[in-house]
Amino acid sequence: MPSPLPPLAELAPGLSAAGKLDRADIEALAQAGVRTIINNRPDGEDPGQLPAADARRLAESLGIAYHHIPVTAVTLSRADVDAFAATLKSAPQPVVAHCRSGTRSTLLWALARLREGADPFALINQAARHGIDIASLPAVAARLG
């Protein structure tokens, strides 16, 4: 019997955000046809967390492209947003971006969308419909310049 999918928040066609992923989650995503995983968690964030190198080996063995763009609220930079946006443009879909809760991944997506002229309040509302709070989006965007 296939493993159940982890909870996914569909942010856009072909892009979902998720919380932490373990081996069973990655296997379930592969079975569901996910083609790319973007990991936004720094290694060692939580005890027992699947290290990015192990997650990469597993994902790639299952035919999933794997990108590690670790961010925290303190370290988030323009370069992180650049890397996330570039990965989204080139990555095979569907894509699942994940962090501990899905919030940082959703924030990175929203920051990339702001650069394309999206309305910040529409992005905040869209995330809220999935139970993800990115109300800090305008302040973070202003801090990053």
Image: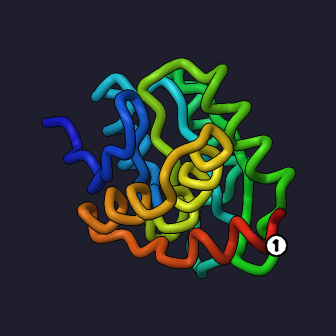
Residue 29 location (% of width, % of height): 36, 36
117 w.r.t. 49: above or below: above
Instruction: Work out whether residue 40 or residue 5 is closer to the camera in this orientation and state it.
Output: 40
Assign the N terminus to one quadrant of the image. top left
Res. 15 visible in picture: yes
Q: Which residue is at a point 43% across and 63% down the rendered structure image?
A: 121
Residue 129 location (% of width, % of height): 24, 63
Instruction: Work out whether residue 110 or residue 142 is closer to the camera in this orientation and state it.
Output: 142
Residue 104 location (% of width, % of height): 57, 65
Quadrant housing residue 88: top right
Residue holding disc 1 = 75
Q: Which residue is at a point 62% across and 38% down the rendered structure image?
A: 116
Tell me which amino acid carries mark 1. Answer: Thr
Question: Number of marks in the image?
Answer: 1
Tell me if 129 is positioned left or right of 134 in this view: left
Q: How is the image coloured?
A: rainbow
Q: Which residue is at a point 59% across and 42% down the rendered structure image?
A: 117
Instruction: Work out whether residue 69 or residue 65 is closer to the camera in this orientation and state it.
Output: 69
